Image (spheres, rainbow, N blue to C red):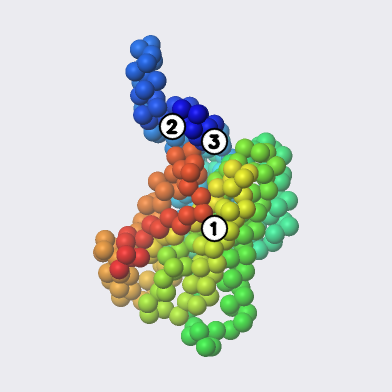
Amino acid sequence: MLMWSRIRTQSASPLGKLGVEAALEAAADPSITPKPKIFDEFALTDRVGLVSGGNRGLGLEMALACCEAGARVVYCFDLPEKPSDEWIASRDYVAKLGNNSRLEYFSETVTDQQALWKKTEEIGDKEGRMDFCIAAAGILRSPIDCLEYPAEEYREVLDVNASGVLFTAQAAGRQMSRFGRGGSIILIASMSGSVTNRGHAWISYNTSKSAVLQMARSMACELGEKKIRVNSLSPGYMYTSMTKAYLDKQPHLLDVWSNMNPMGRLGRPNEVRGVVTWLASDASTFCTGSDIVVSGGLHSW
Ligand SMILES: NC(=O)c1ccc[n+]([C@@H]2O[C@H](COP(=O)([O-])OP(=O)(O)OC[C@H]3O[C@@H](n4cnc5c(N)ncnc54)[C@H](O)[C@@H]3O)[C@@H](O)[C@H]2O)c1
């Protein structure tokens, strides 16, 4: 009994009694009307988020999913001065959801640490909180043999895909720490961080994504005591502008990539909606330092 009460103080759910505990409470008190709580655990009601690379692709899909889950606002940032048509359509769609959620956009590069910290501090000043962050900005450059890979291009990929992910996570994490409510940071890695892409000379990409996997573990260990969770999310091949650049030039790659996983197809960008909402929300409060792989099973072969 003593042990149970200690465990409860350690780990009470922010949503009160859940699952079997809720059932036992209802059994002891017939005045309680049971209601499903599982979707409440996924709700992001009134939460504030930051998404890098949020102008299109996976970043925008994930930002929109968080708005559907009830976030007060998701701040997307990306390189273009003005957001894309798909971002504008998503913003307008969110405005019509009727849940008071909104999408915002600003232009910034993930490689400017100070600018990012400053901008995110301004967001913190305005919103009074920062709850989740999705570091999705990334680049993939042309395949070049590892023995010939030019220094400048290698540094560029590492700068955006590794340093930029850290700077984004820092920007949001500093605000989470300031407000003391904890938070969830999701670093978009890739299955390319754990496996090497067969047939592709992607040394800079593979190396940068491996760095993100370790970054998530390392940050998770440092930030656990602040109740800030840090996980990485590793998609497999998905059809976005990044992969389109390859597939349009080499259509035979569609079959090659599709046959590299047991599902026999590429992923749709909207197939990360569930997992990102889970990671951002209270449905995953004991998950930190993990890499969640969404690859159609590619990593299993
Ligand atoms: N599409 C896939 O198959 C796949 C698979 C695994 C991982 N990923 C990763 O998912 C993330 C999103 O990729 P995507 O497929 O949506 O590609 P995408 O090219 O559609 O989106 C990436 C976004 O990042 C932005 N970006 C690039 N450099 C930036 C910078 N310096 N500052 C701010 N923004 C910058 C781009 O402008 C773009 O909008 C990337 O990190 C990518 O490596 C993609």
Tell us which disc is closer to us: 1 or 3: 3
Secondary structure category for the residue under label 2: helix
Q: Which residue is mark 2?
A: 40
Q: What is the three-letter code of the residue carrying label 3?
A: Gln
Q: CA distance from mark 2 to mark 3?
A: 21 Å
What residue is drawn where x is 47% and y is 55%?
290
Q: Which residue is mark 3?
A: 10
182 vs 163, nearest the viewer: 182
**Position in image of residue 77 (x %, y %):** 60, 53
Res 38 quadrant in image: top left
Mark 2 vs 3, N-terminal side: 3
Asked whether mark 2 lies closer than 8 Å to ligand 1, one says no
Q: Is residue 206 left or right of residue 120?
A: left
Residue drawn at x 54%, y 63% is: 214
Query: Which quadrant of the figure contains the C terminus?
Result: bottom left
Answer yes or no: do the residues labelled 1 and 3 have beta carbons within 8 Å?
no
Q: Which mark is residue 225?
A: none
Question: Extreme bottom residue here?
Answer: 147
Can you identify the residue that label 1 sits on? 217
Q: Is residue 276 above or below residue 203?
A: above
Tell me the residue at 61%/73% (across/down).
156
Choose between 65 and 28: the one closer to the eye: 28
Rendering coords of residue 36 (x, y %): 36, 27
> Mark 2 or 1, which is nearer the eye?
1
Q: Quadrant of residue 169?
A: bottom right
Mark 3 lies on a secondary structure that is: helix
Estimate the spatial distance between the alpha carbons at disc 1 and disc 3, rounded to whole Å. Answer: 22 Å
